[in-house]
Image (cartoon, rainbow, N blue to C red):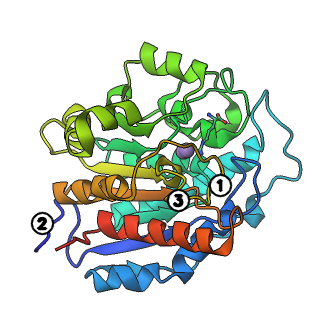
Amino acid sequence: MSTPANKFLPSPKTAAIVGCPFRGGQPKLGVDKGPIHLVEAGLVSQLEELGWKVQFDGHHQFESLAAESDPPIGKLKNPRLVSKVCESVAQAVGGHAKAGQLPVTLGGDHSLAMGTISGTLDAYPDACVVWVDAHADINTSETTDSGNIHGMPVSFLMGLGEKYSEFSWIKPALRTDRIVYIGLRDIDSGEKRLLRENGIKAFSMHEVDRYGIGRVVEMALDHVNPKRDRPVHLSFDVDALDPSVAPSTGTPVRGGLTFREGHYICEAIHETGLLVALDLMEVNPSLADAESVRQTVAVGCSLVRSALGETLL
Ligand SMILES: NC(=[NH2+])NCCC[C@H](N)C(=O)O
Ligand SMILES: [Mn+2]
Ligand SMILES: [Mn+2]
């Protein structure tokens, strides 16, 4: 089957792999190894086989960005490091997007989305976000229990909650009606309030069960992209998938998307011809036995392939 052209990318279509070995947004070791495993599993050549030109100049090195001391600010853990890393990721992603490339950011923890989505919105102010996750990641410094910034990137992108000079580079450019969630099932009480008060659209696993994934993706796009003319940033946290499908991740939650539901989302976004940036986050190759790690890395690669045009027929 021939794939539709992408409405925003010049041909030859070029994907830029933005490898982000970063774990500062959460406490577990190993998530910084995710991008290395995804690339070693052959992602670059897999995308080339799909007809993409792939630019990959090695993983980003964030060591030099470590602050000499980085005590918590309020409840925020590793705030200076997370901020600096995300600022540099925003520049990288924004640069690729402005050059007409499709940035594919490999995490790393989901705090990185502060950077990726900032970069996308810098290049495409009109873009909308499809956020696929078990979690809403919209805690503020006030509502968070954990203090882990990977549970907060959406609030920073929207400018919700207290402002900190350390994060002043972030423009609150993400409108509350330009994001839609799919796959939610573990939302903190403060996050439920934020979603409700800001009228943010979310399709939890309850809606996936009720309507099926096909209708859910259609309704999600109807909300953020009714005329199907806006660029789409897809931010995919691998923990959206059920732990039986993607076991090696830091905050697994049972009752998640099946293998096919996850891939369907990626395929349907590809079919819009509107995808301009992709994140694949929270693959942690240190949290399971070798076979479960292999399975999680493989499913990560195949989600990226689906979003970039791999079809079943
Ligand atoms: N990107 C993720 N896996 N986020 C998990 C967040 C869990 C929890 N809501 C927290 O704020 O800590
Ligand atoms: Mn998650
Ligand atoms: Mn997440």
Q: Quadrant of residue 78?
A: top right
Which amino acid type corresponds to the residue marked 2 in the rendered image?
A: Pro
Q: Quadrant of residue 140?
A: top right
Residue 4: image tag: 2
Q: Is residue 108 visible?
A: yes
Query: What x and y, as percent, mark residue 16?
Result: 42, 72
Disc number lying in front (2 or 3): 3
Which amino acid type corresponds to the residue marked 3 in the rendered image?
A: Ala
Say left or right for 188 vs 164.
left
Say left or right for 214 vs 131.
left
Q: Secondary structure at mark 2?
A: loop
Q: Which of the two labelled residues, at mark 2 and mark 1, occupies the earlier sequence position?
A: 2
Residue under pointer 1: 85
Counting other residues with Cα less than 10 Å from the Cα at mark 3, is it few (<14), some (14-19), or many (20 or more)? many
Q: Which of the two labelled residues, at mark 1 and mark 3, occupies the earlier sequence position?
A: 1
Q: CA distance from mark 2 to mark 1?
A: 35 Å
Query: What x and y, as percent, mark residue 122?
Result: 40, 48
Say left or right for 147 vs 5.
right
> Where 87 sits versus 31, above or below?
above
Which amino acid type corresponds to the residue marked 1 in the rendered image?
A: Val
Residue 246: image tag: 3
Q: Which of the two labelled residues, at mark 2 and mark 3, occupies the earlier sequence position?
A: 2
Q: Is residue 100 visible?
A: no
Counting other residues with Cα less than 10 Å from the Cα at mark 2, is it few (<14), some (14-19), or many (20 or more)? few
Please name the residue shown 74% across and 34% down the image. Answer: 76
Whether the residue under disc 2 has CB within 8 Å of ligand 3 = no
